[in-house]
Image: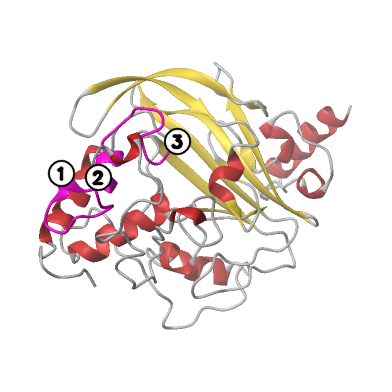
Amino acid sequence: MKALLGAVALFVAALAGRPAEVNDAAITGDALPAKLSDYRFFADLAGETPAARVIPYDLETPLFSDYAGKHRFLYVPEGHEARYDAEAAFDLPPGSAIIKTFGYPQAGKFRPIETRLLLRRASGWVALPYVWNAEGNDALLRRAGTRIPVTFTDPSGVTRRISYAVPNQNQCKDCHALSGAIAPIGVKARYLNHGGQLEKLLAAGMLDRLPADAPRVARWDDARAPIEARARAYLEINCAHCHNPAGAASNSGLFLELGRTDPVALGVRKRPVAAGRGSGGRDFAIQPGEPDASILLYRMESTEPGVAMPELGRATVHKEGAALMRAWIESMPKTAQAR
């Protein structure tokens, strides 16, 4: 009966020309909805027509995930605003949600594979994975995760066949944990500050303020930007959620946040805390001027479990990202510390 009433409400809203409303109770309640459609984030789920206050966004430099395309949306409930922060992720109020759908082109159309939700409840953030059905009209909760065979063509035209990993609910903490609690990664001023996205959030009443000097990160694949800025942006979004003093790799001493300036903490002539297979016989995380002698690149170019970095979220090597790291390390003077 509840499902029928929900469908009727959507139909009535569409007839009236008004956006459908998100099911706030599904976000804030203790239950774990079985279907993505239960949240009503979209008036048309398959077509990704957003409901009221569900705003699409993208990142200037995004996380690499086996060349998957990602459709991102942010929801902040009516009467509430995210609190702007120049450095950290925006402080989103209870009832907010971050929606990220992963997929690949198929027959010229985006085919969704999974949707990951971050739900802001009174007790904190909750991460949930939803796997899309074969019809592409809904996604079902898969707390245990799963693997899905995927075939796609990478940017160089090579056909790839991988076992795509949907993380289980606990694995979400491996990337999204900050001091032990789940937290967003990408909703930061420097990643959203392009294409008028911050201005749109402000105009929609979803952001409390927007300073004129909001920071902006370099785009990793923009050859016009300085190579160090591009490389540092790439490392931050792909690695720094673990490689920071409060992250899962805090004991490594390798800290890759964008604002960090100590070259040794960034890996320059830094020896690993525990040498092993992951070092590949190399001495330093980054050996200036010598990418093939650098542990960082060795691990980026590996897909071997226990060696590959990042540990989760990829079954392939990001050739373009590795090429950027190679060029950056090559640009470093062999006799000087990196800035």
- Hey, what amino acid is under mark 2? Leu
Earlier in the chain: of badge 1 and badge 2, it is 1
Query: In the orientation shown, which residue stands out farthest toward the right?
Result: 1
Marks 3/1 in contact by CB < 8 Å: the verdict is: no
Report the span colored magenta: 283-312
**Residue 292, relative to residue 58: is it above or below?**
above
Mark 3 neighbour density, 10 Å: few (under 14) some (14–19) many (20 or more): some
**Residue 271, relative to residue 216: is it above or below?**
above
| Foreground tag (2 vs 3) | 2
Q: Which mark is residue 292?
A: 1
Asked whether residue 59 appears in the rendered view, the answer is no
Q: Secondary structure at mark 2?
A: helix
Earlier in the chain: of badge 2 and badge 3, it is 2
Marks 1/2 in contact by CB < 8 Å: the verdict is: yes
Mark 2 neighbour density, 10 Å: few (under 14) some (14–19) many (20 or more): many
- Hey, what amino acid is under mark 3? Gly
The picture quadrant where one finds residue 253 is: bottom left
Q: Residue at x 53, y 43 (%)?
A: 100
**Residue 120, relative to residue 217: is it above or below?**
above
| C-alpha span from label 1 to label 2 | 7 Å
Main SS of the magenta segment?
Answer: loop
Please name the residue that numbered disc 2 is placed on: 297
- Horizontally, residue 45 falls left or right of residue 261, namely right
Please name the residue that numbered disc 3 is placed on: 313
